[in-house]
Image: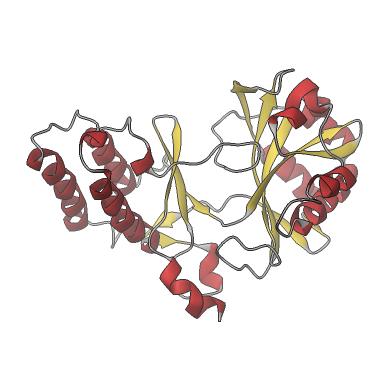
Amino acid sequence: MNFQKFNIINEGGAYGHIMHPYEDNSLTFKDIKNIITQFFNTDPSFQATEKMDGVSLLVTWKNNSIRAARNKSHLANYGQNSLSPAELKDFFSNKQGNYTAFYDALHALNIAFNASKELVNKIFCNGRRFLSVEIIYPGYTNVIKYRDKKIIFHNIYEYDIYGVRLYDETYNMNALYNLLLERNLLRQNDFEIIKPNILSFDKNNLNGLKYDYFIRRIDTLYTYNHLTEDDVFASIDKVHIKDFFIEFGKFIIESSIGLMTDKYINKIPTEGLVFEYNGKTYKLTGDFRKYLKQWQD
């Protein structure tokens, strides 16, 4: 089975944290200007996806059954200590929070995978590879309260015997998604299995005046502090860069077309979006929380 390799977009669980750009002290002012340009150029090769407020889980198919991982020990020895649905439930039994989302989602995936287990086993190589999924569950709320159950497929990673990710072995999940689509298996136990929501942008909003405005703000920050664009932004008070990215993030999110959240509320920003720059994954989150009460009421 052929896979297309590319980078993952995800966080939480056995993964690390996705940074805001202002959290990466290695970025220069020139890098920030390049990020601005990346959004305004609307290059077809550049993709940003909607950041949902779900919970993350790694899943695999080992010995003809669904298994899950929430930490490195579950990934080691090619998933030998990964968790069955019952073990996952026990894993969270003494922890705070509503973890029914994990258990129910794992059961839904087990039904879908079991219906195509021969091909699914080839994809997961009996526990060597794990799929990153994000679970949207009405009973589990981080910040945004969703109304539908969804399982979002991200990408598939391969791990070595120690549970260390092989960064050169990253696979697109399309082969697995398309297999389930062809066999009408994308809806299981009230869950809908979906892909990440790739966004487009309103070109009327992303105009030259706005571009010049954001570039001038960055130019002013480094020239006022007697720096150059090749200096790292960590050379100045970080609050200025954070304030910039909150404003920039809010503008970009409000310029996005096709937000899943829009079907619930009209033009209220979602949690944010995720994008890549120079091989790293970043997120933009505008000041969306002030809209939540209106939406959730």
**Left or right: 226, with 88 as reference point:** left
Residue at position x 34%, y 43% from top? 22
Judging depth in this view, the residue of 125 and 10 nearest the camera is: 10
The residue sitting at the front extreme is 94
Look at the picture and state if 123 lies above or below 152.
Answer: above
Q: Quadrant of residue 176?
A: top right
The residue sitting at the top extreme is 161
Looking at the figure, which quarter contains the N terminus? top right
Where residue 161 appears, as percent x and y from the top left, is: 74, 17
| Residue 31 in view, yes or no | yes
How many numbered marks appear? 0
Where residue 162 appears, as percent x and y from the top left, is: 71, 19
Where residue 86 appears, as percent x and y from the top left, is: 89, 47
Residue at position x 8%, y 35% from top? 226
Judging depth in this view, the residue of 107 and 95 nearest the camera is: 95
**Left or right: 163, with 64 as reference point:** left
Q: Quadrant of residue 186?
A: bottom right
Residue at position x 77%, y 43% from top? 179
Where residue 95 appears, as percent x and y from the top left, is: 74, 51
**Left or right: 102, with 46 as reference point:** right
